[in-house]
Image (cartoon, helix red, strand yellow):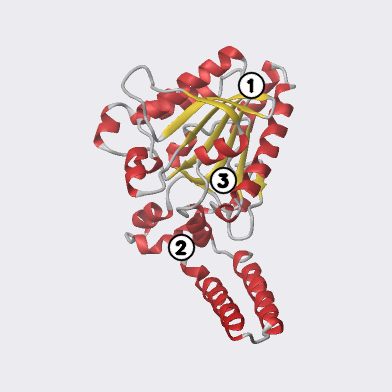
Amino acid sequence: MLEFEKPIFELGLKIKELGVFSASKKIALEPELKKLAAKLEQMKIEIYSNLTPWQRIQVARHPQRPFTMDYVRMMTSDFIELHGDRQFADDLAMVAGFAQIDAMKVMLIGHQKGRDTKENVLRNFGCAHPEGYRKAMRLMKTAEKFGLPIVTFIDTPGAYPGIGAEERGQAQAIAENLRDMIHLKTPIIAAIIGEGGSGGALGIGIADRVCILQHAYYSVISPEGCASILWRNAIKAPLAAEALKITAEDLHKIGVVDKVIAEPMGGAHHDPIKTASDLKEILLKYIQELTRLSTEDLLEQRYGKFRKMGIFLETPT
């Protein structure tokens, strides 16, 4: 339960208690229960339709939100996971492999978080190391070799900033991914399913089409990091979230993402199957569109997409 969801849970609990009381005492309270149920639905609509950017980020970070492997199970068949960067190790924060979405064969790559402390430590909280990005690029080039579309699921607070990661070339690994993805001769579709933090997200985010779930976010820096830099106080994170314009609607408005996918009331974790179905529909649509393009048109459009991002004003000095 998130802080802003307390009124919903409290009213839901009261309705449940009243229902149990009515059944145990054999008192007819159906009219009152119906009124309370209607009030609960209206409360949900009012709260979830008016979330602030900071509240959206809390939903994106919800521990029960579907992760990459959840979507793999719900929308693909014949997933064969592949491992290792052929240089150092296999990074469990980055999963990848061959998959089939309906009749379409793809290379699927994504960040993976954990459900509990033990799994989060194993997955490094979804923060990939250099070997994770090198594994991703190795398999992207494999996809290019066999003419397979690439689908990436972005869900990370950011690339791991530890000393070991820096010693093994974290910045270079991400930079090489940015450089090489722009030239890959196969369609690339990226889906932001939760957190899209900084270069850690962009390292698998250079795509022909970028879609985002309604309550996910995509940002050059986390709100806490931004607040620590600008105001020297992480408590100002809600203010930073507002200023950064990192919600799905803001990103669509400025052309960073191509499609916002609506989530069930309250977020993807309230109905993962419906979310996976809607996401799958968009992915298949994009794959079909992009596979019709010639290689030259595909690369030209991808390059143009990123070149035209950003708005600035010039004033005479």
Judge whether residue 275 can be spotted in this image. Answer: yes
Q: Position of residue 276 (x, y in %)?
A: 62, 43
The spot of residue 70 in percent (x, y) is: 53, 41
**In the rendered image, which residue does mark 2 sit on?**
239
Q: Earlier in the sequence, mark 2 or mark 1?
A: 2
Q: Helix or strand or loop: what does disc 1 sit on?
A: helix
Seen in the picture, residue 88 relative to 203 is either above or below; the reply is: above
Which residue has dot 3 on it?
316
**Residue 152 occupies quadrant:** top right
Q: Nearer the viewer, mark 3 or mark 2?
A: 2
Of residue 27 and residue 210, the one placed in the foreground of this image is 27
Kind of residue indicated by mark 2: Leu
Asked if disc 3 and disc 1 are in contact, CB closer than 8 Å, the reply is no
Q: Secondary structure at mark 3?
A: loop
287 left or right of 1 in image: right
Q: Earlier in the sequence, mark 3 or mark 2?
A: 2
The residues tagged by marks 2 and 1 sit, at their Cα atoms, a distance apart of 38 Å
Q: Residue at x 56, y 37 (%)?
A: 73
Q: Please, what is the three-letter code of the amino acid marked with disc 1? A: Leu
Name the secondary structure under disc 2: helix
Q: Label 1 belongs to which residue? A: 299
Separation of residues labelled 3 and 1 (CA atoms): 36 Å
Label 3, label 2: how many angstroms apart (C-alpha)? 32 Å
Q: Crowding near pointer 2: few (<14 within 10 Å), some, many (20+)?
A: some
Q: Residue at x 53, y 34 (%)?
A: 205
Q: Are marks 3 and 2 in contact (CB under 8 Å)?
A: no
Closer to us: 299 or 147: 147
Question: Taking the image as drawn, is residue 160 in sight?
Answer: no
Closer to the chain start, of discs 3 and 1, is 1
Residue at far top of view? 145
Residue at left offset 37%, top offset 17%:
86
